[in-house]
Image (cartoon, grey):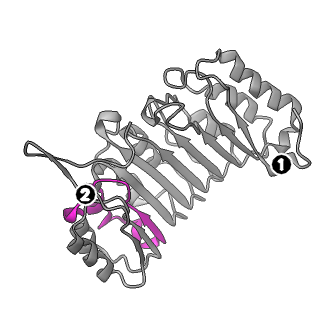
């Protein structure tokens, strides 16, 4: 492995070339990184294909064991795969709680996919960004995030997804997040890609965490005029710098009403969608599903 002049200035990517590679091949990449790169120089790590990611869980324990040496690790992206490698809803994870415990200095954690994903409520004083990208985020993970103590967290992204891809959360499961008791530094909140976007908007209307936010993201979901009306009928949102509602199902009248109600707020209403009607049944889709 040829090292850059400053190995701490790059993000190290671990990925096997073949989707059906033997598990030992990925473990060998981890060993090579541990042996050839100074441990304190591993600041950012991206995990790509680890081999049969559609049915074999990401080997979290291997990363946990290495994390004891990677004391400088600050950013971690788990399962950075494209749909050509594996559909987002097929990516298999497991319990990521031990990884957070093993990386007390971690500041950024992004994760793609949520099949079999588990998380226990934790206290982590270093984390500043936490992002779950999924076509269906399990309700138990949503509740666990809300029960965590993350005093430094500035940004939280939850892609709720669709029920038929494992996104079984309802608005009540977001109570902990919306209360914000464990998230005192939160300034950017995304609860997006949601099949339950209207219910989320209604809950946001009275959520205690909202007054401290600078940016609110309810995009990529199935937001309709009903949700927009509930959002505007709730607490003031004029303190926001940015409200992201792109990929929505709003009428032109509802979209105009949102803009008119929030002067000075940068409102993104791009990529409007049109519901599909098949034999009297109306279908609306999140931006990301399978």
Quadrant the C terminus occupies: top left
Task: Determine whether 275 is above or below 92 in the image.
Answer: below
> Farthest residue toward the left?
280
Secondary structure found at label 1: helix
Find the distance from the CA under tag 1 to the CA under tag 2: 44 Å
Which residue bears the numbered disc 1? 8
Is 216 within the magenta? Answer: yes
Q: Is 109 positioned to the left or the right of 270 in the image?
A: right
Residue 43 disc label? none
Callout count: 2
The span picked out in magenta is 198-227
Which residue bears the numbered disc 2? 198
> Farthest residue toward the bottom?
263
Q: Write the residue at 70% across / 16% down.
A: 24
Q: Is 26 positioned to the left or the right of 283 in the image?
A: right
Q: Is 152 positioned to the left or the right of 267 in the image?
A: right
Q: Is 134 positioned to the left or the right of 107 in the image?
A: left
* Image quadrant assignment for residue 238: bottom left
Closer to the chain start, of discs 1 and 2, is 1
* Image quadrant assignment for residue 166: top left
Task: Determine whether 249 is above or below 101 in the image.
Answer: below
Give how far across and how far down residue 185 sits, in percent.
Answer: 55, 64
* Image quadrant assignment for residue 181: bottom left
Q: Write the residue at 48% across / 37% down.
A: 113
Q: Camera-side residue: 225 or 232?
A: 225
Quadrant the N terminus occupies: top right
Secondary structure found at label 2: helix
Give how far across and how far down residue 6 sits, in percent.
Answer: 89, 49
Give how far across and how far down residue 13 sits, in percent.
Answer: 71, 38
Q: Write the residue at 19% across / 63% down.
A: 226
> Farthest residue toward the right?
5
Q: Residues within 10 Å of mark 1 (few under 14, many from 20)?
A: some
């Amino acid at each position: 492995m040829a090292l850059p002049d400053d190995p701490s200035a790059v993000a190290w990517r671990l990925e096997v070339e073949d989707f059906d590679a033997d598990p030992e091949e990925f473990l060998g990449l981890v060993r090579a990184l541990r042996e050839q790169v100074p441990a304190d120089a591993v600041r950012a790590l991206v995990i790509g294909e680890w081999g049969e990611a559609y049915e074999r869980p990401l080997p979290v324990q291997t990363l946990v064991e290495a994390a004891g040496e990677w004391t400088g690790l600050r950013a971690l992206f788990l399962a950075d795969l494209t749909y050509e490698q594996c559909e987002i809803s097929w990516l298999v994870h497991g319990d990521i709680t031990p990884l957070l415990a093993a990386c007390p200095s971690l500041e950024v954690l992004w994760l793609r996919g949520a099949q079999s994903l588990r998380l226990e409520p934790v206290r982590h004083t270093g984390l500043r960004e936490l992002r779950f990208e999924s076509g269906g985020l399990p309700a138990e993970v949503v509740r666990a995030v809300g029960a965590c103590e993350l005093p430094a967290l500035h940004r939280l992204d939850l892609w709720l997804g669709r029920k038929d891809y494992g996104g079984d959360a309802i608005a009540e499961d977001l109570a902990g997040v919306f209360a914000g008791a464990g998230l005192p530094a939160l300034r950017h909140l995304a609860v997006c890609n949601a099949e339950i976007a209207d219910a989320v908007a209604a809950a946001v209307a009275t959520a205690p965490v909202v007054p401290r936010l600078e940016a609110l993201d309810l995009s990529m979901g199935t937001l309709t005029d009903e949700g927009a009306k509930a959002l505007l009928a709730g607490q003031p949102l004029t303190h926001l710098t940015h409200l992201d509602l792109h990929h929505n199902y709003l009428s032109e009248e509802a979209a105009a009403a949102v803009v008119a109600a929030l002067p000075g707020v940068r409102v993104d209403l791009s990529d409007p969608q049109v519901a599909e009607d098949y034999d009297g049944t109306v279908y609306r889709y999140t931006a990301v599903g399978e």
